[in-house]
Amino acid sequence: MTFLFDKIIFGPVSSRRLGVSLGINLLPENSKYCNFNCIYCECGWTPNKSAGKVSFHSREKIYEALDAKLLEMSEMLTPPDVLTFAGNGEPTLHPHFAAIIDDTIELRDKYFPNTKIAVLSNASRLHIVSVFEALLKVDYNIQKIDAAYEYTIHRINQPKADFSLSGLVENLKRFRGNVILQTMFLEGEYLGESIDNTSDEHILAWLKIVQDVAPSEVMIYTIARDTPVETLRKVSIEKLNQIAASVQELGIKTQVSS
Ligand code: SF4
């Protein structure tokens, strides 16, 4: 069973990758909104909705919710390690994403100056100047790149809007290293065809992209919860560790979650 977040602020939860994380869901509650339709998405399939029909929470309501939660956590002396933008879809689709990042920096500095801010994004909106510049302000700018071939990335992520791997790579390079790459490795079948982004040939092509983008870090992971496609399989920890070792040979820090 896939799941959706039912609040703007969720947690804190102990994150596989980031430590004690207070989540911020900029998307509507109990409904997914994304411009991708990843076959492994923990939120389930993306419903067909146009942006005009989506009721985003206002910037003010998000500010109030975060302010109230951080005040409560500061009174309880329980600082989060990280404030994480994730949730029911792609956070950069919120029309006031950049302003909300500024608000979050202000509130973080007020309550917990040592807490980090993370954004988990599918990297599809980096061509928008305000989005790109806002991402440069956060501590963990985590961008998804799930494959090294156009065909494979389209099959895994099923982007709804115009999207190309070559454009994505060019945009990632513009961060000049101020980016963390995140890749989901998986195996299995989808619509009668094999899906596998862990073959030697694919890993070599992916490593070449990693080298070109030169991120500060790479996070690799595999399926941990239910996915909309039931014929996908987790990649073994041995294989993930092997991939991580190849990234480390490039001199890039790598984190594995399985
Ligand atoms: S980009 Fe993220 S939220 Fe969107 S479909 Fe993929 S995994 Fe789900």
Image: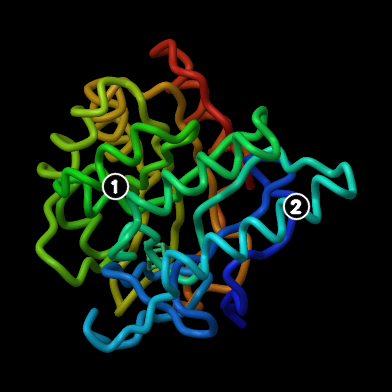
Q: Which mark is residue 112?
A: none
Whole-percent x, y for residue 144 in the image: 36, 47
Q: Please rate how many residues cluster around mark 1, counting C-alpha atoms within 10 Å: few if below 14, some from 14 to 19, many from 20.
A: many
Q: Dot 1 corresponds to which residue?
A: 147
Tell me: 134 left or right of 138. Answer: left
Which element is circle 1 on? loop
In the depicted view, which residue is nearer to us: 179 or 113? 113
Q: Please rate how many residues cluster around mark 2, counting C-alpha atoms within 10 Å: few if below 14, some from 14 to 19, many from 20.
A: some
Tell me: 45 left or right of 202. Answer: right
- In this picture the colour scheme is rainbow
Q: Residue at x 15, y 52 (%)?
A: 150
Whole-percent x, y for residue 113 in the image: 65, 30
In the depicted view, which residue is nearer to us: 198 or 49? 49
Q: Residue at x 42, y 72 (%)?
A: 58
The correct choice, above or below, for 41 with respect to 99 in the image is below
- At label 2, the amino acid type is Leu
The correct choice, above or below, for 224 with respect to 141 in the image is below
In the depicted view, which residue is nearer to us: 36 or 64? 64
Q: Residue at x 39, y 36 (%)?
A: 181
Q: Dot 2 corresponds to which residue?
A: 71
